[in-house]
């Protein structure tokens, strides 16, 4: 154990976008905990987001540090046996560099792809995007965060000119009057955040939950609306129709701070309540009650998550909920607004700084000439050498083995997590060359030509950006095991082998300093943020330009500047710690004075309901929706290696209503097959009245025959590139034999 781990180290959980604060200290006893980990978790009660609370995943996270739970040596594919065998780092990196170089030389630079992860730190995401565009010269880079909140990001950008998960701190949620929570089960996906909804109700506020299942979160609601999956857009339009019909619009706010209302109003008025009831299955009296609760409160918020976002019309669906906020004056005001609950640990920062197909660091557009000039100057290259926008995540995966012949993949497991997963697995197998850098030997790593073992959260320092836009510092608490390197060391080693001796340092703080320069003046301006400042202030909210001067925080594609940093900040309070004289305070709350559009007004976008890409029929009469369970996380590559979490959630299941189970003759615990147009999954039945009779639910954390994403539909949102994970048509088949 190195000197850094002698005392308790303040850091953050490696899992979801809450990025809960925690402490790490040496395990008691022999120097290792019962699981073999050298560290144990200590509550960090002073950190404002979770105030010491942690879920089971966070409390057991050190178990993944144990050598038996993770990779500790590079592996290369033996061409004779076909097996992955141990190798030295020089051999492994040489083989990766040669595979990428050979493919690019033979088929062109865009034949080499890069696929990143929403759990990578800001430094690693930044370096990966730079590596793809400068070293490989490829446009083919995207990341699994595309499957997280890309629809919400696109909708926020259309309406507000800027996307940040929450434009206000989580603490504001407990102080508003009404929260309309759409498609989120916080009790299982972000348990420490549930306290904000509990405090909301203790303060006299009201909670409306929209979910086709009566989840543990929905149980807390004053009103639970259970729409048919894929009809959230009609629901939002129906509520806005009632707002207009009942005279509940805020005409003064609409006139002073928005544009485009007449067209959006006309679109909403075409969705009358009885029609919305037929589409969604929600009775008109419940629609009216939702409007009453939302509008009678002195302040209100709409918070969305993957439910409405992971649809082929996700951008329009989120846009409809934003329209509801704007029409009622519930945006750009204290304790009111729209926010998206980012899911992955660094889903926010990961796309801000360059591993998304169409973005450069600082949330700059890759097709903006001014943005290209700025970033190219920081990188020391000519702007014209930077490739243009590439394919979105699923499109990139679908192109593997065809136009994209080699892939460098860091921190993702698409064999389990991607839609139409069996097809994606086939495309990965068709590659000429695959290199995977990961902490564990995931299902995707099993298919690789080279597997590189990399350090994880407690073994390296770096920043992440949580769902509030709060930039945080994860600190190294222990050295990685011998034979393990950091992702930054991997990228530096590959860059040198590919002819770039400089520009890819292994020191994360050095990378962050370059990131600050690259982001300066962009919408996600980090130039006023430093490691020391983050440590002093429990995180800093972006945008935070250097000094107190102007920031181009809201430039549109035209390059028109929306003004100084106040254009997106409004009246602010300091983020909590000493920042030095003249320093920008950071931006906890966006849009209080103006929105980040060229004219400072929020934009209504007219949207109209349309059916899901795939509707039920006689052959596939039931709707499948997917999601997470409390004890597992994402593809399960990490959590399935923790004994306590596996004991709590040992495998997949199919949740179905008693009426559907009776009709099919299915008993609780009996194995059933779920069949879609893309494949077949088998798992035990879980009979529950908490789900709609026309809907079944499967969690997506497991590979093999219970892989839920074998079934899901890759139909893409035309704006965001988000696949339609949350709704597809299936049939249920009864099987014989034990569960």
Image (cartoon, rainbow, N blue to C red):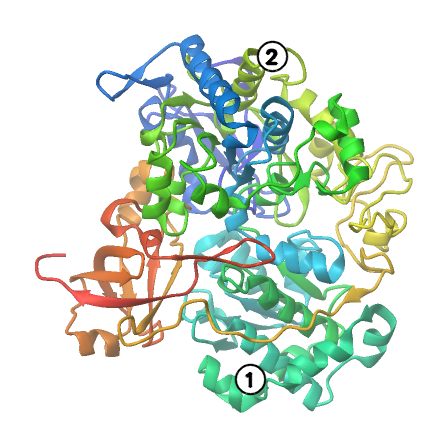
**Residue pictured at 28% horizontal, 73% vertical:** 657
Find disc 1 in the rendering and name its residue.
287
In the rendered image, residue 481, in percent from the top left (x then y), is placed at 42, 16
Q: Secondary structure at mark 2?
A: loop
Q: Is residue 559 or residue 666 the one in the foreground? A: 559
Which residue is found at the position 38% from the left and 32% from the top? 431
Name the residue that disc number 2 marks.
499
Residue 564 showing in the rendered view: yes
Name the residue furthest left: 737
Q: Is residue 156 left or right of residue 59?
A: right
Where 583 sits versus 309, above or below? above
Q: Residues within 10 Å of mark 2 (few under 14, many from 20)?
A: few
The CA span between labels 2 and 1 is: 62 Å
- Which one is earlier in the sequence, the residue at label 2 or at label 1? 1
Where residue 311 appears, x then y in whole percent? Answer: 50, 62
Q: Are marks 2 and 1 in contact (CB under 8 Å)?
A: no
């Amino acid at each position: 154990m190195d000197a850094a781990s002698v005392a308790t180290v303040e850091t953050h959980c490696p899992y979801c976008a809450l990025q809960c604060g925690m402490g790490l200290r040496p395990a008691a006893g022999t120097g290792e905990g019962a699981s073999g980990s050298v560290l144990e978790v200590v509550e960090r009660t002073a950190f404002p987001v979770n105030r010491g609370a942690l879920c089971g995943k966070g409390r057991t996270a050190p178990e993944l540090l144990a050598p038996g739970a993770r990779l500790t040596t590079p592996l290369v594919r033996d061409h004779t046996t076909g097996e992955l065998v141990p190798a030295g780092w020089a051999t492994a990196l040489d083989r990766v560099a040669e595979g990428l170089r050979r493919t690019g030389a033979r088929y062109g630079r865009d034949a080499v792809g890069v696929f990143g992860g929403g759990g990578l730190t800001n430094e690693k995401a930044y370096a990966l995007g730079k590596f793809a565009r400068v070293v490989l010269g490829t446009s083919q880079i995207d990341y699994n965060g595309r499957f997280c909140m890309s629809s919400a990001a696109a909708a926020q950008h259309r309406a507000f000119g800027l996307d940040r998960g929450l434009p206000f701190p989580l603490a504001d949620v407990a102080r508003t009057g009404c929260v309309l929570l759409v498609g989120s089960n916080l009790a299982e996906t972000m348990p420490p955040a549930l306290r904000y909804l509990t405090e909301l109700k203790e303060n006299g506020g009201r909670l409306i939950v929209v979910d086709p299942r009566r989840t543990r979160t929905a149980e807390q609601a004053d009103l639970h609306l259970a729409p048919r999956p894929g009809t959230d857009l009609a629901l939002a339009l129906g509520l806005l129709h009632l707002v207009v019909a009942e005279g509940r619009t805020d005409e003064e706010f609409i006139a002073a701070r928005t544009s485009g209302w007449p067209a959006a109003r006309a679109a909403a008025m075409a969705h009358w309540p009885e029609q919305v009831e037929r589409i969604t299955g929600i009775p008109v009296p419940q629609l009216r009650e939702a409007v009453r609760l939302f509008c009678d409160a002195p302040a209100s918020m709409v918070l969305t998550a993957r439910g409405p976002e992971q649809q082929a019309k996700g951008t329009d669906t989120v846009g409809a909920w934003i329209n509801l906020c704007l029409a009622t004056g519930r945006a750009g005001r204290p304790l009111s607004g729209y926010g998206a609950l980012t899911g992955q640990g660094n889903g926010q920062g990961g796309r801000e700084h360059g591993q998304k197909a169409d973005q450069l660091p600082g949330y700059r557009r890759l097709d903006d000439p001014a943005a290209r000039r700025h970033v190219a100057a920081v990188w020391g290259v000519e702007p014209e050498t930077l490739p243009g926008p590439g394919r979105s995540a699923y499109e990139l995966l679908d192109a593997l083995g065809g136009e994209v012949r080699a892939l460098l993949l860091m921190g993702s497991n698409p064999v389990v997590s991607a839609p139409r997963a069996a097809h994606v697995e086939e495309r990965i197998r068709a590659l000429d060359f695959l290199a995977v850098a990961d902490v564990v030997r995931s299902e995707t790593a099993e298919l690789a030509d080279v597997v590189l073992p990399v350090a994880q959260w407690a073994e390296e320092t770096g920043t992440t950006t949580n769902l509030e836009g709060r930039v945080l510092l994860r600190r190294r608490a222990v050295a990685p095991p011998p034979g393990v390197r950091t992702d930054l060391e991997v990228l530096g080693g590959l860059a040198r082998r590919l002819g770039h001796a400089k520009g890819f340092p292994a020191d994360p703080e050095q990378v962050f300093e370059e990131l600050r320069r690259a982001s300066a003046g962009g919408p996600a301006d980090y130039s006023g943020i430093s490691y020391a400042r983050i440590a002093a202030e429990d995180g800093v909210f972006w945008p935070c330009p250097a000094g107190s001067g102007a920031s181009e925080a809201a430039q549109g594609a035209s390059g028109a500047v929306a003004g100084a940093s106040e254009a997106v900040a409004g009246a602010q309070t300091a983020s909590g710690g000493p920042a030095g004289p003249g320093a920008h305070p950071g931006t906890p709350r966006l849009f209080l004075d103006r929105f980040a559009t060229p004219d400072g007004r929020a934009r209504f976008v007219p949207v109209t309901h349309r059916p899901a890409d795939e509707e039920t029929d006689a052959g596939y009469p039931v709707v499948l929706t997917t999601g997470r369970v409390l004890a597992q996380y994402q593809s399960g590559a990490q959590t399935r290696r923790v004994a306590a979490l596996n004991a709590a959630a040992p495998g997949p299941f199919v949740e179905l209503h008693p009426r559907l189970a009776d009709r099919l003759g299915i008993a609780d615990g009996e194995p059933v097959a779920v069949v879609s147009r893309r494949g077949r999954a088998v798992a035990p039945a879980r009979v529950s009245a908490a789900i709609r009779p026309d809907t079944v639910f499967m969690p997506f954390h497991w590979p093999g025959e219970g892989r839920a994403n074998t079934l899901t539909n890759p139909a893409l949102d035309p704006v965001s590139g988000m696949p339609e994970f949350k709704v597809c048509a299936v049939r249920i088949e009864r099987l014989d034999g034990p569960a």
